[in-house]
Image (cartoon, helix red, strand yellow):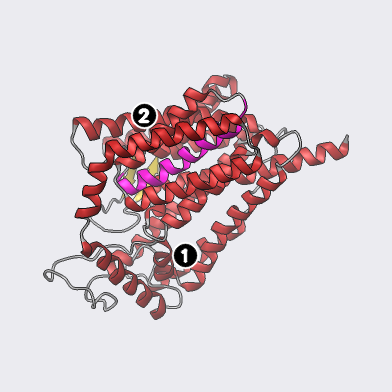
Amino acid sequence: MFELKYIIFFIVLFIGVPIAVVFAKRFDFVEKSLWFLLLFFTAKTEDINFFSMETYRGTARGFEIGLVDITAIILFFVIYSRRDKFPITIPAGSSLYFIYFAFSFISIINSDVYIYSFFELWKMIRMYFYFFVVYNLVRSFDDIEQFLKFMLIIVGFITFMVLKQKYLEGMFQTRGPFPHQNSLVMYMIVYGSIFLSYLLNVKNAKLYVWLLAFGAASVDIISTLSRGGMAVFSISIFIIFLLSYRNKFTLKKLGITLVFLIGATGILYKASDTIIERVQTAPEESLNVRVVLAQAAQNMANDKTFGIGLNNFGLKINPPYSYGEHIERKDSDEKGGLVETVYLMVAAETGWHNLLVFISFLLFFYFKNIKNYLALKKGKYKKYRYLPMAFIGCLTSIYLQSTMEWVLKQTNNFYQLMFIFALIVAITRILQKGKEHGKSK
């Protein structure tokens, strides 16, 4: 017998979606509200899980369909209805993603529990669909700046949750609406980087708004007490300051820098006791666990050409499999964790060759963004150069953080990464269209 949640889901899918499409096409504020939800539900995920296996320690535990997917479906039909005016196209970088998906699919030949692999494959399909919709939705820099306004609201919501957890609930390492504090760190690095770059490089930026937003993102990251997170966020901040000063020196930037240094000093001083306690009490065995799990991941990648099977790491790290036999366990029932780097996880589950494809996929957008940064040096769109500056900073931090944690495979962070990738290739298309328009004139 169907559970109530499934009945509600199918009512929303087959009745709610068509109604929402009609209203979104007719009323601009309805469509813009859906844009907001498309972003908001990457932070506050609300999912229905089919064939859920919550006890499994893997990167996907069921066939999830979330409100973010429903929102993406609605907006897909909206953009499809406008295909005569705005043709729907395949985003750049899709070929690399398809190759990555194909090798991930092939790895299933070595899976011992096939449904675990299909959980992750389904998630990968959802991520690409989200990427596809955002890319075809964004047609101008004004569209991107509309999303920036929504980011302010989302960061306000997350910060409220973080402060509530920290001061009312007494949570030592806050995580906001996310499943883990590391997810919060990676998520807020992106928004914090965008806010800082906007603050430094947009002439008419309202200082108190963007400075407060950047401060909120910073407080959220510090509240997680993630040592690696604070370090990589500092790298993003340094890159953005460097690129901003290199772009143009102004007294405004100098003033913001001084305010930033004073504010950062005050925040760090206020949190210094907790940060010091976190560093001093961090268990040495944490590093040892990372090392032995990395060794196990290498054993898996070396043993099977196509990997041990997508999303099967959580299964095969344990007996009777021999990959983790070097790991000391308290008793025979203790289960091993997941390797603390997304790169070795990809190699272990889908092969060394697919790790190369995955890295190529990540670097494709990184260098595409650098190309956008160079193209925006002059011309009518140069005021939007703050966007690739922010993306250089946050992507550098995300790629570095991913050497220490597998958080990039978390649903929230995966969505956000695909959102940034969609913006990068959308900017490339906008610049190309502008160039073609200029030539036609």
User: Does the magenta run of residues contain 196?
Assistant: yes
- Name the residue: 47% across, 23% down: 208
Residue 173 visible within the image = no
Residue 275 image position (x, y, % from top left): 26, 46
- Name the residue: 55% across, 37% down: 197
Q: Quadrant of the N terminus?
A: top left
Residue 141 visible within the image = yes
Q: Is residue 93 above or below residue 42?
A: below
Residue 226 image position (x, y, % from top left): 31, 49
Residue 242 lies in what quarter of the image?
A: top right
Query: Which label was assigned to residue 378?
Result: none
The region drawn magenta spans: 179-203
Q: Nearer the viewer, residue 149 or 234?
A: 234
User: Which residue is under mark 2?
Assistant: 157
User: Which residue is under mark 1?
Assistant: 105
Q: Going by the image, does 73 lie left or right of 95?
A: left
Element under label 2? helix
Mark sitting earlier along the chain (2/1) = 1
Q: Going by the image, does 434 lie left or right of 341?
A: right
Mark 1 surroundings: few (<14), some (14-19) or many (≥20) residues within 10 A: some
Residue kind at label 2, given as amino acid type = Phe
- The CA distance from mark 2 to mark 1 is 37 Å
Residue 6 image position (x, y, % from top left): 32, 38
Element under label 1? helix
Q: Nearer the viewer, residue 277 or 188?
A: 277
Residue kind at label 1, given as amino acid type = Phe
User: Does the magenta run of residues contain 134?
Assistant: no
